[in-house]
Amino acid sequence: MTSTAAAVPAPTLDQLADGVSASVRAVRSPAMAVDWGRWLAEIGFLPGEAVTLLSRARPGGDPLVVRVGQSTFALRRAEAACVTVDLA
């Protein structure tokens, strides 16, 4: 018999819990903001780079405080959703 289990999609940066580390798998731009992918790559969100979700603003959880490499940034949830990650 063959298995028909569906592959689980990789999580995005905005889906991580506070304090969780991962590595960047890919960055994609949404149709509404095609320049976001380029901008995220320019500030260090590149495949294989270490990334950690440090915290979320309270209340509402937006923006997110994220460390990529040795730099720390505040990203909106919509921007962080563009970054697919692999859990460490």
Image (cartoon, grey):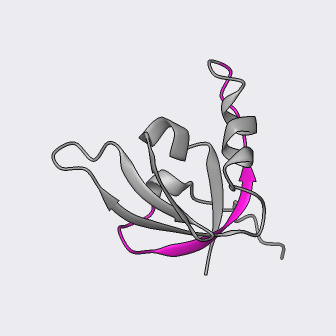
Q: Is residue 48 left or right of residue 62?
A: right
Instruction: Give the extent of the magenta segment.
Output: 16-31
From this viewpoint, is residue 75 visible?
yes
Q: Residue furthest right?
A: 2
Which residue is at 78% across, 61% downward? 47
Vertical placement of 57 versus 8: above or below?
above
Q: Residue furthest left?
A: 59
Q: Is residue 87 left or right of residue 62?
A: right
Work out which quarter of the rendered image holds the C terminus and state it. bottom right
Residue situated in front as seen by the camera: 20 or 71: 71
Which residue is at 49% across, 36% downward? 78
Vertical placement of 78 versus 74: above or below?
above
Which residue is at 16% across, 45% downward? 59
From this viewpoint, is residue 9 visible?
no
Work out which quarter of the rendered image holds the N terminus and state it. bottom right
Which residue is at 45% across, 56% downward? 15
